[in-house]
Amino acid sequence: MSNLMVENQTQQVTVFLGEVVEVITKYVNYYTLPLLLEETPSGDEQYFAGLLASIRRLLVFCEEGLDACSVLLNNKPFRKSAAERTLYKIYHQVIAEFFSPKNDHWYENSRSAYTGKNSIAFQKQPPMSIEQMMKELEGKFQMLREELEYYETDYQTKMIQKY
């Protein structure tokens, strides 16, 4: 990939991560476990606590990625190899965490492409506010995943062949 392409992708990812950080930060600053239990009285407190923990974990990864992209874009000259490593890490950490979080509180339904429904499915019934936030973010994550697919395998192969 050319320097300009990698720089443009880094700029796109920076905008994307900024939007995601804003949405998730607003959510975690407003919603607490008692508020979620009030929203869904029949909900599982332990599951809701796990959902909030997974959302906070995703937020941390997004903030780290945003910081890294900002540093890359502010450095002159633009460092293509550092940007590629960063985009690789964002693909494998941020995107992967959204679609398949560490503690499996939700997962990606692979059949969703055939059904026309959202691909994020929850292990148990989540509060409506979490479901709405995930629906809001899902399309953005799908687009970024497609944009950064190169970093799923091609970049890793390139690095292995290099050494």
Image: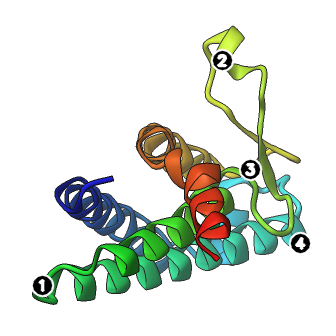
Q: Position of residue 144 (x, y in %)?
A: 43, 47
**Hey, what amino acid is under mark 1?**
Pro
Q: Which residue was labeled with disc 2?
A: 113
Q: Residues within 10 Å of mark 4 (few under 14, many from 20)?
A: few
Q: Secondary structure at mark 4?
A: helix
Which of the numbered marks, if any, corresponds to residue 126? 3
Does residue 89 appear in the picture of this structure? yes
**Hey, what amino acid is under mark 4?**
Gln
Q: Give the CA distance from mark 1 to mark 4.
A: 49 Å
**Hey, what amino acid is under mark 2?**
Ala
Does residue 30 appear in the picture of this structure? no
Q: Position of residue 101 (x, y in %)?
A: 75, 62
Circles 1, 3 touching at the beta carbon (< 8 Å): no
Q: Residues within 10 Å of mark 1 (few under 14, many from 20)?
A: few
Dot 2 or dot 4: first in sequence order is: 4
Dot 2 or dot 1: first in sequence order is: 1
Q: Position of residue 107 (x, y in %)?
A: 79, 46
Quadrant of the image occupied by residue 163? bottom right
